[in-house]
Each structure stands twice: as structure tokens, then as C-alpha cells.
Image: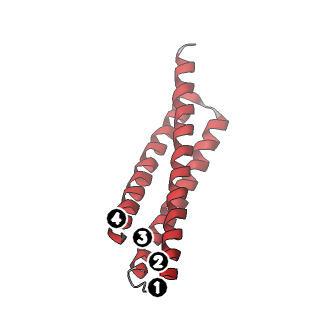
Amino acid sequence: MMKKDKVEVGNWTDDLEYMNEELEYLLDIEDQMLNNAVLYQELQTLRRENTLNLRTLYRYEGAMRDAIECDTVACDAFYLSKHERNRNLYLEHKKKFRDVKSKVLSTILLESKR
């Protein structure tokens, strides 16, 4: 189970690292094409959250080594709960990212029709 969880956390951090790259592109697009202050602020906030979430997942990945030493059900339950919290953090952030990305793309389409 620990091996699967470690792979999963690695996938989450890979996704968030790629989101950082995409956010940079989206910020450039917003700056060069849209000049929408509200959208710019959403992207900046999302980039900050992405950095914080990455930091949280990196710390969690390092702490996973301690879970190997669990020898009680209570200890296992603690790490399982922690993993689920981190999964929810990742999934909620991913949804926010998709929503903001869709806003940028739909704004581009609206602007191109003018």
C-alpha cells in the first residue's frame, strides 16, 4: 500500500509542477492578449496556491518514510487519513485550475470574435 501511495504522491507533484508551467503560459497570455485584472488576480492566486500545495506534498512525501515504521492500526489510520487529506487537497486544486484555465480560454474566444 505504501508503494502505491508513494507513486500516487509522485503523480500529484508531477501534475502540480506541470500546472506551474501552464500557469506561466496563461499569465503571459493574459498579459499580452486579455489585460483582464480580475482574471490576472485569479491566476496569481492560483499560482500561489499551487506553490503552497506543492510544498505540502513534498513535505508529505518525505514524511511517508515514517509510515513504514507503523506497527499499530492507529498509526496506519493516521497515515491513511493524512493521505486522504492530501488527495482531497490535490483534487480540489486541480478543479480550481481547470475552472480558471477554462475562463482564460473562453475569454480568448470571446475576444477573438470582436
Among the 4 quarters of the image, the one containing residue 111? top right
* Residue type marked 4: Lys
Q: Please, is residue 36 above or below residue 76 in the view?
A: above
- Disc 4: which residue: 4
Q: Residue 37 carries which label?
A: none
**Disc 1 to disc 2, how far (Cα)?**
6 Å
Report the mark closest to the observer, 3 or 4.
4
* Residue type marked 3: Glu
Q: Where is residue 38 in the image (x, y as percent from the top left)?
A: 67, 37
Report the mark closest to the observer, 3 or 2.
2
Labelled pair 3, 1 in contact (Cβ < 8 Å): no
Q: Residue 76 carries which label?
A: 2
Labelled pair 1, 2 in contact (Cβ < 8 Å): yes
Q: Which residue lies furthest to the front in this view?
A: 73
SS at mark 3 in the image: helix
Labelled pair 3, 4 in contact (Cβ < 8 Å): no
Labelled pair 3, 2 in contact (Cβ < 8 Å): no
